Image (cartoon, helix red, strand yellow):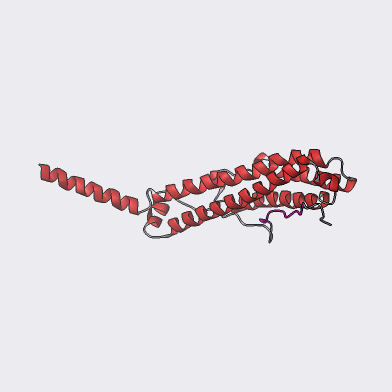
Amino acid sequence: MNRIIAIRTAILGAFALALSACGINSVPAAEENAKAKWADVEAQFQRRANLIPNLEQVTMSSAEQERQTLNEVIEARASATRPEIKLDGDDLQDSAKMQQYQQAQENLGTALSRLLVSVERYPELRSQENFGRFMTQLEGTENRISVAIRDYNEAVRQYNTTIRTFPDTIGANIIHGAEPMVPYEAVSEGAETAPQIDMRSDAE
């Protein structure tokens, strides 16, 4: 009797191991990891959006041209934070939605860079404590965005490799119906690069 139980246990163990090797666990684990990394990306973009009201306060005293550029930033921020722009974990296989999200974030980044280059010409702004604090926070946020995007893309690469590689592809297709996820890519060259602003007092 004990021998029969031992044989059954061994068979069940082998069956469980075979299932595990076929992507039963590895595919959802890789998927959840990618979704978690995407949440980090969204959090950092939201952090950048939250900083913009501070920039608005310190640039309102500048020239009309800069106020116009500031309005472009405010409009781009409103567009990038619309509810329909946000992606959840179930949207990460939708290349059209990812493209829309990327375009909105690039538009905001471009408008923000243009404004910062513009207001950097004003010594009175550069000397303000609030402006200097904002620049420090923005630089840190842009770096966090770059890291979050890199980590997300690596998680997507691992997930997409898992669902295409034998034997995980068996469970991915038959059991999970897994679809490839879309990496985050800059819409235009250099869009993922943080704005570079020279804050030295002797900058021309």
Q: Is residue 140 left or right of residue 113?
A: left
Q: Is residue 193 magenta?
A: yes
Q: Position of residue 30 (x, y in %)?
A: 45, 50
> Which of the 4 quarters of the picture holds residue 169?
bottom left
Point out the residue furthest to the bottom here: 189
Residue at 32% x, 50% y is: 19
Residue 180 appears in the figure? no
Q: Position of residue 7 (x, y in %)?
A: 16, 48
Residue 79 appears in the figure? yes
- Report the predominant secondary structure element of the magenta stretch: loop
Q: Is residue 167 magenta?
A: no
Point out the residue furthest to the front here: 202
Up the image or down, 45 lies above or below 170; here it is: above
Residue at 38% x, 48% y is: 25
Residue at 89% x, 45% y is: 64
Q: Is residue 153 left or right of residue 74?
A: left
Q: For the N terminus, give its image quadrant.
A: top left
Magenta-colored span: 191-199
Q: Position of residue 104 (x, y in %)?
A: 69, 49
Question: How many numbered circles does the render carry?
Answer: 0
Q: Is residue 49 left or right of residue 28?
A: right
> Which of the 4 quarters of the picture holds residue 4?
top left
